[in-house]
Amino acid sequence: MNEFHNNRYDVVVVGGGPAGLSAALVLGRARRRTLVVDAGEPRNASSSHMQGYLSRDGMSPAEFLAAGREEIARYGVELVRDRVSDVARGEDFTVALEAGREVRARRLIVATGLKDELPDVPGVAERFGRDVLHCPFCHGWEVRDEPFGVLASSAASVHQALMVSQWSKDVTFFLHAVAEEELSDQDLRRLAAAGVAVVPGEVAGLVIDDDRLTGMRLADGSTHARSVLYVGPRPVPQTGLLQKLGAEMNETPFGTYPVVDATGLTTVPGVWAAGNAIGFAEQVIHAASGGYRAAAAIVGDLLMSELDAAV
């Protein structure tokens, strides 16, 4: 096989998380030459387990991804540990990798996910995924009935404080940089109805004893005993490639994401997106499903384009 054909793929999948690997599995089984480019930086890397995925509940994210890589390899899918540095449209898509390789693809799937930008409170980043959490659906059962703290990043954090009250009846809402007058009367009524205590004042840091969260320390020196802290990270979608390709984007309260149809097709012909690259709330199970849908659509799209060319 000459160099051109060796570096030409039916599909290049950018991102080897649940969405990218799921798409690659479907493509490989459909006998489409597929390359997965993975930087090895999954969003849930700090978590020791994932929940809510039927038949995989409690599995570690690392184990889940390792199993996925083994599965796609059975069908001849290639995976490289690299990062896409540039992409350009032409008759094919030209995809440049940081290591220096350049490949061509007839179709693209962008599954580059997002990064969580954590509140700038000492100790939060170091304990994120352990006793500092952000999603009760992911970890609420494991810490049920413990004393919860919720760190406000805006008045919208009231929603998080109310939601986590389903997993514990001992919840304290730390207003941090949010003024109490920013909360509406309805917010205050709901917090009271849920039994959530409201504590004004800036949080200066976490209290850690024997490598466990034991409390919150406020700027005035007071401490409040808590063993779990929920925070609201600012999502930063990794959509630079989609924007470079000219995809139409949609501004949301949780970041800027591409406009896609039900299969993940963007407004750029031949380019699909899946997983957290299309939305903040995509859990692992949603991302895997989205990757499957995108891949199935591409299989049909490639077939029809080949038949039309033959006619």
Image: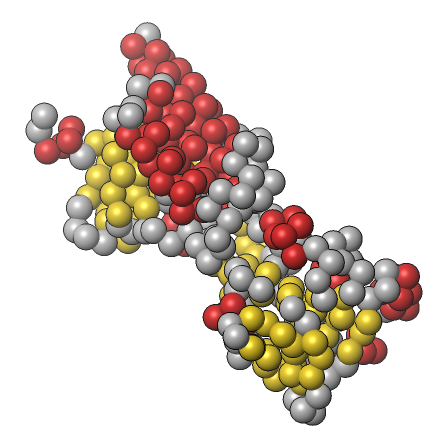
Q: Looking at the picture, how far across and down is residue 58, in whole percent? A: 54, 43
Q: Which of the 4 image quarters holds residue 283?
A: top right
Q: Is residue 110 above or below residue 177?
A: above
Figure quadrant of the N terminus: top left
Determine the residue located farthest toward the front in the rendered image: 210
Figure quadrant of the C terminus: top left
Whether residue 26 can be seen here: yes
Determine the residue located farthest toward the left in the rendered image: 2
Q: Is residue 254 above or below residue 229?
A: above
Q: Nearer the viewer, residue 45 or 17?
A: 45
Q: Nearer the viewer, residue 38 or 196?
A: 196
Q: Looking at the picture, how far across and down is residue 99, in whole percent? A: 19, 52
Whether residue 12 can be seen here: no
Q: Is residue 247 left or right of residue 10?
A: right
Q: Nearer the viewer, residue 287 or 230?
A: 230
What's the coloring here? secondary structure
Which residue sits at x=67%, y=50%?
141
